[in-house]
Image (cartoon, rainbow, N blue to C red):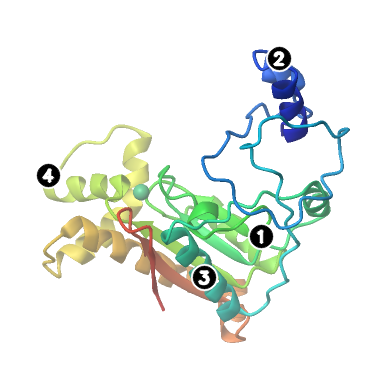
Amino acid sequence: MVSRRLLLGVLASGLAGAPLAALAEGDDHHAPAPRKAAPKPRAAAARAAPAPVRSTVAEYPKPVETHAPEVIINPDEALGRLKHGNAIFARGGASMALPSWTRINELAGGQKPFAIIVGCSDSRVPPELVFDCTLGELFVVRVAGSTVSREGLGSILYAVEHLGAPLIVVMGHTKCGAVGAAVDVVTKHSHLHGALFDMALPIVPAVLEAQAKSPVDLQDAAIRQNVHDTAERLKSADHILSERIASGRLKIVSACYSLSTAQVEFNV
Ligand SMILES: [Zn+2]
């Protein structure tokens, strides 16, 4: 992660053309891009690292102090938090709060995500943004089409059993290309080569199920059927999941994100 203060120092000293990588503190060379509208900082303290430098770039957003989220053990509380976060995102008011160094260091010692998101790899549906969350809050399993492989199931089990996540959301999205590919396999007998076929294959049963209901929009119906079926299968995919559901410590729901409204519709 590139230190904002180092960046500010470079900008202030007129060395903006210097390679940013040479100024990075870590091995991540992605510099944060200036934003058009800076969020209101809460407490701008405690970014304890490099020596402070004076900024001459007034519009550059100041670091925003974030606090450790409460440990959430109630599935309904976790669900409510996701709904609240999405409502903020959908109305364009995402806080985009960056974690403080204090928080980053806290998370280095362990994580306690309050939800697992099984989502699509689509670049327009990043869970942390869609739910207005920050570092350490979501455990994310993403593959095109929001399906769950054996490895994906293992990832989910790890987050439930070892990290105590109380909620799993299997989330699709409108106009999902992976589901569209599966629809073409069913309706047009299209040929997908190699691993692309492997990606679409787990979605085909949902397409057939949706097709049997003669929907107006087969792709949209298949998208919703796919996440519904995936969520239902997860409930009995492992005894750890089924036992926690039975004892009220875990909830599994499906959801669909609208690319046009930015709203997540939960099926609960
Ligand atoms: Zn997709």
- Depth-wise, is mark 4 or mark 2 nearer the camera? 2
Q: Earlier in the sequence, mark 3 or mark 1?
A: 3
From mark 4 to mark 1, how far is it between C-alphas?
39 Å
Residue drawn at (69%, 67%) of the image: 161
Q: Which of marks 4 and 2 is nearer the N terminus?
A: 2
From mark 1 to mark 2, how far is it between C-alphas?
46 Å
Label 3: which residue? 84
Q: Quadrant of the C terminus?
A: bottom left
Q: 10 Å neighbourhood of mark 3: few (<14), some, or many (≥20)?
A: some
- Residue kind at label 2, given as amino acid type: Leu
Label 1: which residue? 158
**Label 4 lies in ligand 1 vicinity (Cβ under 8 Å):** no
Q: 10 Å neighbourhood of mark 1: few (<14), some, or many (≥20)?
A: some
Label 2: which residue? 15
Q: Helix, strand or loop at disc 2?
A: loop
- Depth-wise, is mark 3 or mark 1 nearer the camera? 3
Judge left or right: residue 226 versus residue 7: left
Q: In which quarter of the image is the N terminus?
A: top right
From mark 4 to mark 3, how far is it between C-alphas?
41 Å
**Residue 133 falls in which quadrant of the image?**
bottom right
Residue drawn at (76%, 56%) of the image: 43
- Residue kind at label 1, given as amino acid type: Tyr
